[in-house]
Each structure stands twice: as structure tokens, then as C-alpha cells.
Image (tube, rainbow, N blue to C red):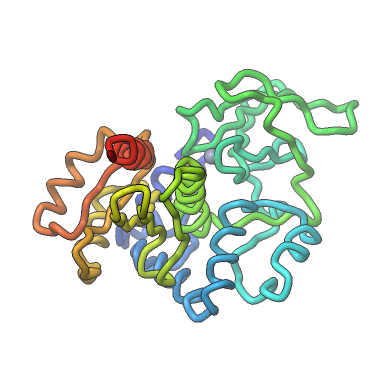
């Protein structure tokens, strides 16, 4: 529990990713007690029936715009808006409200947690991107009309623009953020990092939700293919359980599961769990990009 008696993010995520039936936890945990892969699967089931272009559009929008004003979302989503319960009003989330203002994380664009630290000061941080510098303080500004100024933090504060934690601002739910926004942002970063290489192409969501990215090499490079799925789960044990239950994708190419680079020290443990599945490889997003670029450079 944090100092306000609220369940910390880490506990909440672990609880979601494992089946935790404790009554004590239930009091603070109002969501259905589903295992993470069931929750993740439910999300995918909602969009799986969409035609391929719409499926790709929804996944891109959830990654690129996890928070926006209703009118902006309505415009971007077009005819797809209102068909899914992915968004919630930011005004209903007290945990990210710093004296009426909310700040998106400079890394993932989702609302950062705002915790009163006494004397009108709030500690503002993204639970996932804290170590990448997404942690600040801000002082309640009673006279000003705009959002208070963030201070500190390893990421440039210029990139963080506060918005009113009220009215028309909507954000994707925590579950959508974890299972669609975070991996989606990794996938688009991989695509962008591999753009502009002659012979290399990246296809997003090539086979619906079977896997996320297909990278192909063709002339002037030697023909080759990589298949990639990104995962941003907090618990690698729960992720391993889910991956082990996954049917073998088939084909000669293994499926590469990429995880955020900050989790690289947890990879050996995940590899041990997946030792019986030669069709699955695991590496970080950065390592995947470096590996593909190295391979391209090594071509005659
Ligand atoms: Zn973040």
C-alpha cells in the first residue's frame, strides 16, 4: 500500500497477471479476477473480427493516442469510435490528478501518477518509465491559469504538457495500456528504426492477431524473414505461462517475443522457462533492432 492506503501499481499488475483470490486484495481490486492472458485475449477478441485495415488502425491509434480529448479521438477513430470500451474519462481517476491537472508520460503518453508529497507539492511519475526519467515534482499553483510546471526528471520537461484532469479528456484503461499501448509503441519504434534500409520491409499485423510484425529482407539483401510479437507484461512468470499455452505458430521461422530493454536482466529466467519451445525466442526490442541491422550490414 502507498501512504494513502491505495494499492501500489506493482501489486495491482501482479494481481492481474496471476490469479490472486485473496479476499484482502479484492477489497482494493475492483476488477474481475481474470488471469492476464484471459484479459489480454478478451481485448484482442474485441478487435479480432475487424477487417485487416481497421484492425491495424485500431492498434496504431491505441499506441499513438492513449490520451486525448473526446473530439480529437472522435475525429481520429472515425467510424470505429464508440465500438469498443477502451477509454475512460481521466476525471474519474484520482490517482493521476495533481490539483486538477494531469501529465502524460513523455515515454508512453499515458497519465503519470500524481501523489501529494505535502506542502502543495506532488510527485509525478510513470510507474513503468520511472527509471527512464519519467519522474518529476510539481507545485500547486493557485494563482496560475495553466498547468503547473514540472521540475526535475531525466526526460526533458519540455516534452510534457499538462492537461485538465476533467471534462473531455479520455485515456485508455490500464489493461489496454499494458497489453496494447505499451507493446504497440515498442512495435512502431521497431518499425521506425528499421525504415529506409533498401530491401528491408516491416509489415504491421500481417496475420491479424497471430503475431504483430513481419520483417522481410529481399534483394539487394539475401531473402530472410523475422516474425515478432511485443510484450510489456510486468510478471515474466505469468508471461511464460501464457506463452507456453500458446499454440505453435508453425513455419520454419521462430516467433521472436520482444520485451522492453529495461527488463533485459530478467531474460535468462524467461529463456529457462521457455526451454522446451524452440519455436519461441526472447530478446529485448533494442537487441532485435541491433540484430537485424547487424545482419543487413553483413550482407555481401
Ligand atoms: Zn510511461
In this picture, is 283 found above or below 245? above
Considering depth in this image, is 259 or 240 the residue closer to the camera? 259
Instruction: Give the residue at x 24% y 51%.
Output: 237
Tell me where residue 241 sits by quadrant: bottom left
Q: x, y (%) of residue 235?
A: 31, 48
Q: x, y (%) of residue 33?
A: 39, 66
Q: Quadrant of the C terminus?
A: top left
Tell me where residue 249 sits by quadrant: bottom left
Q: x, y (%) of residue 72?
A: 78, 58
Residue 189 visible in this rendered orientation of the protein: no
Q: How many marks?
A: 0
Seen as rendered, the residue at the extreme left is 276
Instruction: Give the residue at x 29% y 50%.
Output: 222
Q: Is residue 136 left or right of residue 138?
A: left
Q: Quadrant of ligand 1?
A: top right
In this picture, is 288 found above or below 120? below
Residue 135 visible in this rendered orientation of the protein: yes
Q: x, y (%) of residue 29?
A: 46, 57
Q: Quadrant of the N terminus?
A: top left
Instruction: Give the residue at x 68% y 31%.
Output: 159
Considering depth in this image, is 215 or 165 the residue closer to the camera? 215
In this picture, is 110 found above or below 278? above
Amino acid at each position: 500500500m502507498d501512504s494513502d492506503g491505495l494499492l501500489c501499481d506493482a501489486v495491482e499488475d501482479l494481481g492481474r497477471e496471476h490469479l490472486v483470490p485473496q479476499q484482502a486484495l479484492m477489497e482494493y481490486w475492483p476488477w474481475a479476477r481474470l488471469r492476464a492472458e484471459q484479459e489480454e485475449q478478451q481485448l484482442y477478441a474485441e478487435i479480432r473480427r475487424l477487417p485487416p485495415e481497421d484492425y491495424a488502425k485500431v492498434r496504431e491509434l491505441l499506441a499513438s493516442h492513449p490520451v486525448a480529448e473526446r473530439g480529437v479521438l472522435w475525429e481520429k477513430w472515425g467510424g470505429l469510435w464508440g465500438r469498443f470500451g477502451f477509454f475512460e474519462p481521466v476525471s474519474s481517476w484520482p490517482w493521476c490528478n495533481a490539483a486538477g491537472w494531469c501529465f502524460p508520460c513523455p515515454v508512453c503518453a499515458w497519465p503519470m501518477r500524481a501523489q501529494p508529497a505535502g506542502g502543495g507539492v506532488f510527485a509525478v511519475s510513470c510507474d513503468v518509465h520511472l527509471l527512464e526519467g519519467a519522474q518529476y515534482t510539481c507545485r500547486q499553483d493557485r494563482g496560475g491559469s495553466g498547468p503547473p510546471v514540472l521540475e526535475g526528471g531525466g526526460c526533458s520537461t519540455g516534452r510534457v504538457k499538462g492537461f485538465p484532469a476533467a471534462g473531455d479528456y479520455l485515456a485508455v484503461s490500464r489493461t489496454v495500456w499494458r497489453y496494447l499501448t505499451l507493446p504497440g509503441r515498442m512495435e512502431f519504434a521497431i518499425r521506425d528504426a528499421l525504415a529506409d534500409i533498401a530491401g528491408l520491409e516491416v509489415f504491421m499485423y500481417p496475420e491479424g492477431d497471430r503475431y504483430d510484425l513481419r520483417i522481410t529482407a529481399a534483394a539487394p539483401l539475401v531473402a530472410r524473414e523475422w516474425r515478432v510479437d511485443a510484450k510489456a507484461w510486468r510478471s515474466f512468470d505469468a508471461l511464460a505461462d501464457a506463452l507456453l499455452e500458446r499454440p505453435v505458430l508453425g513455419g520454419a521461422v521462430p516467433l521472436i517475443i520482444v520485451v522492453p530493454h529495461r527488463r533485459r536482466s530478467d531474460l535468462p529466467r524467461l529463456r529457462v522457462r521457455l526451454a522446451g519451445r524452440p519455436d519461441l525466442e526472447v530478446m529485448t526490442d533494442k537487441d532485435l533492432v541491433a540484430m537485424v541491422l547487424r545482419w543487413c550490414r553483413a550482407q555481401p
